[in-house]
Amino acid sequence: MGFLKENLSDSPVIRVEMDFSNSTWEKKESFKSFCGDTYDERIVISKNAFINAFNKSSRDLTMSDSNGSDKFHIVVKVNNLSRRVSLMRIPPRIKVEIEGVLMVVETATGTIVKTMNYDLMGEEDLAPADRLAHSFELLAKKFVRS
């Protein structure tokens, strides 16, 4: 994140886009097909969790889904999501693993100037929406520390 801090000091807001367009569920079916009617809602949950966690963790930059610096923006590309079950708990708890790449893109040219590959799991939870949110909160915190 040091790159962004240095290059956006005059406009400390950065826009983020979530790209689930080619994401899969369990590397078998499209995430969109898996989610059905809840697909759009899950994208919003993921984006809001990422933005909120970033904004709570960062002292130098603010993230938004609607506006930001003209210089750079962030694309969070999600390649795969998987369920991981903890059978040692009663009832069993589930985590969501997310895999993909986070890219800092120069807006004017579309050039990717920084990338961060990720493969991580958030906290376990009973509610599917909360499991998803936990994973994207963790990703935002990891990005702030990078």
Image (spheres, grey):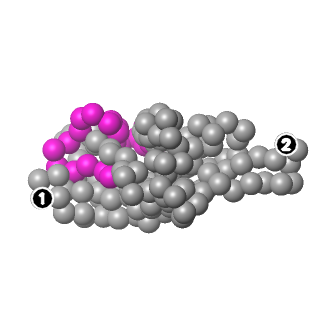
Within the magenta stretch, is there residue 58?
A: yes
Q: Residue at x 69, y 56 (%)?
A: 84
- SS for dot 2: loop
**Which segment did they paint magenta?**
53-75
Q: Position of residue 21 (x, y in %)?
A: 36, 52
Mark sitting on residue 109: 1
Nearer to us of marks 1 and 2 is 2
Disc 2 target residue: 91
Crowd around label 1: few <14 · some 14–19 · many ≥20 (10 Å): few
Mark 1 or mark 2: name the one nearer the start of the chain: 2
Q: Position of residue 12 (x, y in %)?
A: 27, 40
107 with respect to 34 (left or right): left
Relative height, residue 28 to residue 9 (above, below): below
Q: Residue at x 85, y 42 (%)?
A: 91
Q: Quadrant of the C terminus?
A: bottom left
Q: Position of residue 92 (x, y in %)?
A: 81, 47
Residue lying farthest to the left in this orientation: 108
42 with respect to 64 (left or right): right
Between 10 and 30, the one lying in front of the other is: 30
Crowd around label 2: few <14 · some 14–19 · many ≥20 (10 Å): few
127 with respect to 52 (left or right): right
Q: Quadrant of the N terminus?
A: bottom left
Does the image show residue 31? yes
Relative height, residue 100 to residue 64 (above, below): below
